[in-house]
């Protein structure tokens, strides 16, 4: 019963958020309106309007989130950038300097992070020690029944049945820590056929695509084709439509960053990154993109709300007394946990109201099948990230897909029961350090995008 309820609540969130997706199109006049026509005022029949989201994000969440992400726990992410692309031969390695990722020297990363601490808690570490002991054949007779049960659960967790991502084996010698603060996501010059290929594979092969209709990937496609695509999209069940919108939102978010950290000046004296309004318009202007751009921005808000919802649902996990953001620095770790909880409580307080009528009505088997479909498609997308030619883009692509995958794992988890504080935290639900780091950094990127939209809104006011 509890599980069914959990799934229901998760799906309900998705269904409700989808209702944001049906808007009237106006023919706006100014440059700013041409980009933002779909993201102003009320998001259709949802109780939140864009201005409320903007204010909440830009002034309440964004500054605190930035502070958290600068901490040692969140800045180091272990990633294997040398995995071969599973889908085609990627001989094409990007030679651009701006694409390079500088891995950390091993003495840069705090010992607490490098040790087994990517399992979230003392309990988990103890379990891991037990598992290691088992693997070595040293059967520890003294394991209490409780611990044995926990070991079993932990193994279940690790068999990845819950996972929406093909994650890197972080024990591999090719996996290295990178300092995310030293390798910011910004314009690298990685575009053209290679980048195009990645996104078209993601859209064309993985988004529950119809057999005959091509997705309009960018401008330059005919109007009628586009309309066919959108009427096809409308005909999908809400979950599949949600999947498409998440990918589109992620794509939009990445493009907002690239437009906001555009390489404006590149001389031997200095490099300067900053806002490029023209680039932004080319990606989001309603006229230049034949209506696609404003929809992409709306999908960005959709993605934002989905991840926000996941974060509010996962609060009980982080509230467990034994949960630590373990780096080995006790004082700092405690401060970070306090900040993390403050952020999550703030998120929980955001008035997300459900529309009771849009309850997912399908039966349990159908829901499970949908979840499985969703998961397989998403895992595929995470594998495609190994085909991104530019290492810096690959790093941020992997991190953001793992983050979104973690958000989906939370939303679809039957083990983590939302809104039922009386049932207490469920110890069956687990997150690894990598998942935690990617979840918050991915949300940090989208939060930054929403913040940047405000900047572009101002900048576009001077453009006609
Ligand atoms: C801004 O981006 C456009 C392409 O969208 C490019 O042609 C232009 O040179 C860029 N501006 C600067 C100052 O780099
Ligand atoms: C995964 O991707 C491959 C290659 O693009 C494709 O052949 C396969 O059908 C995809 N599977 C799913 C479930 O999307």
Image (spheres, rainbow, N blue to C red):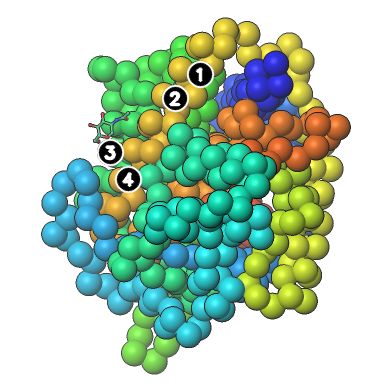
Task: State yes or no: Cβ of the residue under disc 3 lies below 8 Å from any atom of ligand 2.
Answer: yes
Residue at the (64%, 42%) spot, across then down: 145
Mark 4 touches mark 1? (CB < 8 Å)? no
Q: Which one is closest to the eye, mark 4 or mark 3?
A: 4
Q: Is residue 73 left or right of residue 322?
A: left
Disc 2 from disc 1: Cα separation: 6 Å
Sequence order check: which comes first, mark 4 or mark 3?
Answer: 3
Tell me: residue 361, above or below residue 52: above
Sequence order check: which comes first, mark 4 or mark 1?
Answer: 1
Residue at the (63%, 8%) spot, across then down: 361
Q: Which residue is mark 1?
A: 368
Residue at the (37%, 56%) spot, across then down: 169
Disc 3 from disc 2: Cα separation: 20 Å
Disc 4 from disc 3: Cα separation: 11 Å
Residue 342 position by quadrant? bottom right
Where's residue 156, x and y in %? 50, 38
Task: State yes or no: Cβ of the residue under disc 4 lies below 8 Å from any atom of ligand 2.
Answer: yes
Q: Which residue is mark 2?
A: 372
Where's residue 116, x and y in %? 52, 65
Q: Which residue is mark 3?
A: 201
Q: Which mark is residue 383?
A: 4
Residue at the (65%, 47%) spot, across then down: 144
Q: Residues within 10 Å of mark 2 (few under 14, many from 20)?
A: some
Sequence order check: which comes first, mark 4 or mark 2?
Answer: 2
Viewer-closest of 169 and 206? 169
Q: Residue furthest front?
A: 141
């Amino acid at each position: 019963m509890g599980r069914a309820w959990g799934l229901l609540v998760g799906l309900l969130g998705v269904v409700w958020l989808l209702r944001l997706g049906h808007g009237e199109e106006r023919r706006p006049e100014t440059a700013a309106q041409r980009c933002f026509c779909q993201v102003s005022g009320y998001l259709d029949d949802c109780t939140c309007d864009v201005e409320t989201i903007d204010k909440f994000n830009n002034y309440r969440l964004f500054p605190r989130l930035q502070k958290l992400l600068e901490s040692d726990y969140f800045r180091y992410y272990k990633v294997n950038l040398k995995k071969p692309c599973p889908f085609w031969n990627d001989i094409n390695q990007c030679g651009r300097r701006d694409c390079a990722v500088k891995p950390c020297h091993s003495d840069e990363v705090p010992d607490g992070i490098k040790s087994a601490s990517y399992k979230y808690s003392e309990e988990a570490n103890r379990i891991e020690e037990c598992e290691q002991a088992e693997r070595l054949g040293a059967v520890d007779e003294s394991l209490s029944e409780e611990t044995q049960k926990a070991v079993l659960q932990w193994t279940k967790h690790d068999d990845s049945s819950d996972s929406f991502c093909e994650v890197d084996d972080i024990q591999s010698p090719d996996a290295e820590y990178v300092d995310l603060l030293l390798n910011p996501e910004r314009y690298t010059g990685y575009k053209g056929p290679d980048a195009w290929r990645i996104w078209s594979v993601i859209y064309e092969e993985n988004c529950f695509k119809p057999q005959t209709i091509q997705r309009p990937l960018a401008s330059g496609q005919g109007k009628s084709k586009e309309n066919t695509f959108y009427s096809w999209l409308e005909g999908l069940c809400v979950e599949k439509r949600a999947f498409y919108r998440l990918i589109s939102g992620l794509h939009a978010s990445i493009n907002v960053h690239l437009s906001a950290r555009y390489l404006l000046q590149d001389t031997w004296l200095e490099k300067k990154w900053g806002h490029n309004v023209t680039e932004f318009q080319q990606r989001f202007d309603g006229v230049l993109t034949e209506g696609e751009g404003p929809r992409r921005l709306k999908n960005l808000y959709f993605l934002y709300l989905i991840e926000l919802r996941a974060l509010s649902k996962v609060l009980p996990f982080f509230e467990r007394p034994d949960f630590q953001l373990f780096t080995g620095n006790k004082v700092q770790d405690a401060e970070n946990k306090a900040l993390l909880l403050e952020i999550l409580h703030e998120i929980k307080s955001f008035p997300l109201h459900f529309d009771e009528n849009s309850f997912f009505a399908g039966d349990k088997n159908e829901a499970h099948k949908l979840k499985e479909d969703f998961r397989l498609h998403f895992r595929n997308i995470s594998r495609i990230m190994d085909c991104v030619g530019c290492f810096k883009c690959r790093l941020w692509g992997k991190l953001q897909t793992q983050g979104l995958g973690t958000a989906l794992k939370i939303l679809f988890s039957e083990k983590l029961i939302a809104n039922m504080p009386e049932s207490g935290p469920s110890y069956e639900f687990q997150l690894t350090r990598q998942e935690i780091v990617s979840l918050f950094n991915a949300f940090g990127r989208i939060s930054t995008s929403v913040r940047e939209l405000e900047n572009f809104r101002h900048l576009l006011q001077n453009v006609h």
